[in-house]
Amino acid sequence: MSQERLPETPAPTVGVVAALAVLAAVVAPYFLIDATAAGVYYSQPTFVPVHLVVGLFATVSIVVFAAGRNGRTDPPTAAGAAVVLGGFMALLVLWWAIAVGGLVGSLTTNATFDYHRWLLFAATLAVAASAGWFAREVL
């Protein structure tokens, strides 16, 4: 049985790094502001605990990217799963970032915290983009 050799691409490694950046961005408010305020920040405007869902999907994305890169999972299947996870994370964080806009200024006087939600959104976009790149390379 002949096995087709897939091209070597750095896309899954970039995806792992981007998913780790999402995890770092998710936990950052707990170091920047009071933990109670961070809990309000993540759960107030939505019915979904955004930080938990996005953190879970980022963790699963790390496993999916690594399995596709190492050949433990069929790379086209891994790339497709990563596209779905990255896209859902990006859409969920965009929805949350827009909804939490009015709450951010009342939580802290730390001006750099005002940009956290957009940093998190950019990190999820990086996961989605690297997943798209991985899918383009293996399909």
Image (spheres, rainbow, N blue to C red):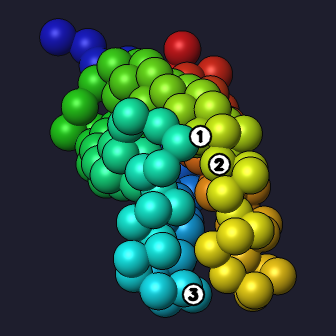
The amino acid on which the numbered mark 3 sits, given as a three-letter code, is Leu
Label placed on residue 96: 1
Residue at left offset 38%, top offset 24%:
81
Mark 2 lies on residue: 100
Earlier-in-chain disc, 3 versus 1: 3
Distance in Å between CA atoms under marks 1 and 2: 6 Å
Residue furthest right in the image: 111
Task: Judge left or right: residue 25 versus residue 114.
Answer: left
Residue furthest front in the image: 106
Q: Judge the density around disc 2: few (<14), some (14-19), many (≥20) Cα neighbours within 10 Å.
A: some
Residue at left offset 63%, top offset 74%:
107
Distance in Å between CA atoms under marks 3 and 2: 17 Å
User: Which part of the image, by quadrant, shows the N terminus?
Assistant: top left
Judge whether 132 appears above or below 49 on screen.
above
* Residue 125 at least partly seen: no
Residue at left offset 53%, top offset 42%:
45
Judge whether 98 appears above or below 24 on screen.
above
Q: Judge the density around disc 1: few (<14), some (14-19), many (≥20) Cα neighbours within 10 Å.
A: many
Q: Secondary structure at mark 3?
A: helix
Circle 3/circle 1 CB separation < 8 Å: no
Residue at left offset 54%, top offset 85%:
33
Distance in Å between CA atoms under marks 3 and 1: 19 Å
Mark 3 lies on residue: 32
- Name the foreground residue: 121 vs 63: 121
Circle 3/circle 2 CB separation < 8 Å: no
Image spot of residue 15 (x, y percent): 53, 50
